[in-house]
Amino acid sequence: MSANLPGIRFMTGVISPITISTILGHNGSGAYPMMLSSDYRQIVKEAKKRKLTILAKSSTYNEKVGNYKTWNPFSWRCIRIIKDPSLGLVNAYGLTNKGVKYHAKKIAKARQLGVKVIPNFYPEFSKGTEIAIKETLDAISIYRLELGDEFWALEISYSCPNDRSNACLSSPVKITENMEQAIRCTKEIRAHDRKLVLIIKISYEHPIEFIQELELIGVDAAHSINSIRWEIVFPNIPSPLKKYGGGGVSGGPAFLFAFDYNEKLRKAVKLPLIMGCGVMSPFAAQAYADIGADSVSICSVIRINPSNALEIIRYL
Ligand SMILES: Cc1cc2nc3c(=O)[nH]c(=O)nc-3n(C[C@H](O)[C@H](O)[C@H](O)COP(=O)(O)O)c2cc1C
């Protein structure tokens, strides 16, 4: 087997053939409580040593308290392991973060220390289109201020399956309802900043035409795809996270859905693609390479099976 993943080269920076998505935390240097595990710490080290691109966990403009609270071990139950039919995760994390000003500073420090982390921003369209766009443009200025020339790329997430505008029990914002807002937001970012490399993180529920439109606007790459809503993967089984809206499925059980989507997407756009979701082994990474991924992302495997994650990293 040979992976044959080129990675993605831009004038201002490079995305490695394998990328680590969100699981290394908001600044890419590792997240508590996973840092307590020596296997996890080894992956953090390996990622830095091999200069792997790390896509940060999402920041919102202001601090946000979702379902997951670092200080409350009971809330860690909003991330559960699925054992059947294959190993994966269901999570209803809900975007807990300290806001862009805080995380931009930490990302700047991590980059100074050689961590190849790219920030990820989540525009909160539930606040209204104008506010979300203004916050996104302001966030870009904050990243620029804190990171300077190190700010060459930004991942924008249009695909969180767990966004909820109010309390934990409110119904989740529908991903597909944000498409018009996302198109407007992307146009404004592009008009505001022509050079910034824009990576758009998309959802299984986004029609392919949506990504084609983003390509026309001038995004530079798509990260396809985020975790998939529980009801789609397991239509006949109630989610253990039902009280949080069901959560998003990642890892093994999501792979075939994601693979099918990515195969269609590859035929429909010329954009560089970071393909991910469900990569739990070198074979799955190879499968994405075979259908034309430029880079492959991993996340859940690092949490569930770090030795497999190391194998994937070394293989690629
Ligand atoms: C606990 C957890 C938290 C996540 N948080 C984010 C996030 O903040 N922003 C985002 O864009 N994706 C987030 N994701 C999605 C992952 O980055 C990844 O795209 C998804 O899990 C599919 O890949 P995988 O099957 O390799 O895990 C999260 C996933 C998990 C499991």
Image (tube, grey):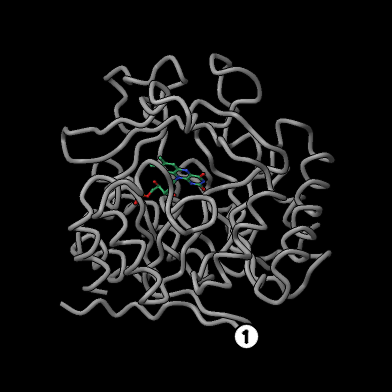
Identify the residue under disc 1.
11
Question: Residue, x 59% and y 26% (percent of image)?
Answer: 164
- Quick one: quadrant of the C terminus? bottom left
Residue 305 drawn above or below residue 162 = below
Seen from this angle, which residue lies furthest bottom? 11
Quarter where residue 65 is shown? top right
Q: What x and y, as percent, mark residue 259?
A: 32, 54
Q: How many marks?
A: 1
Q: Residue 223 versus residue 37: which sits nearer the camera?
A: 37
Q: Residue at x 52, y 79 (%)?
A: 14
Q: Classify residue 173 as left or right of residue 264.
A: right
Identity of the residue drawn at 18% across and 58% down = 308
| Left or right: where 288 falls relative to 12 | left
Label 1: few (<14), some (14–19) or many (≥20) C-alpha neighbours in 10 Å: few
Residue 178 vertical placement versus 196 (above, below): above
- Identified by mark 1, the residue type is Met
Q: Is mark 1 within 8 Å of ligand 1?
A: no
In the picture, the quarter occupied by the N terminus is bottom left
Q: Quadrant location of residue 107?
A: bottom right
User: Which of 269/65 is in front?
Assistant: 65
Decide if residue 253 is on the left or right side of residue 119. left
Provide residue 130's location: percent of width, then percent of height: 84, 40
Residue at 42%, 76% in the rendered image: 51
Residue 256, how many percent across, how many down?
A: 27, 48
- Element marked by disc 1: loop
On the image, the x and y values in percent for residue 199 come to 58, 62
Q: Is residue 69 above or below residue 194?
A: above
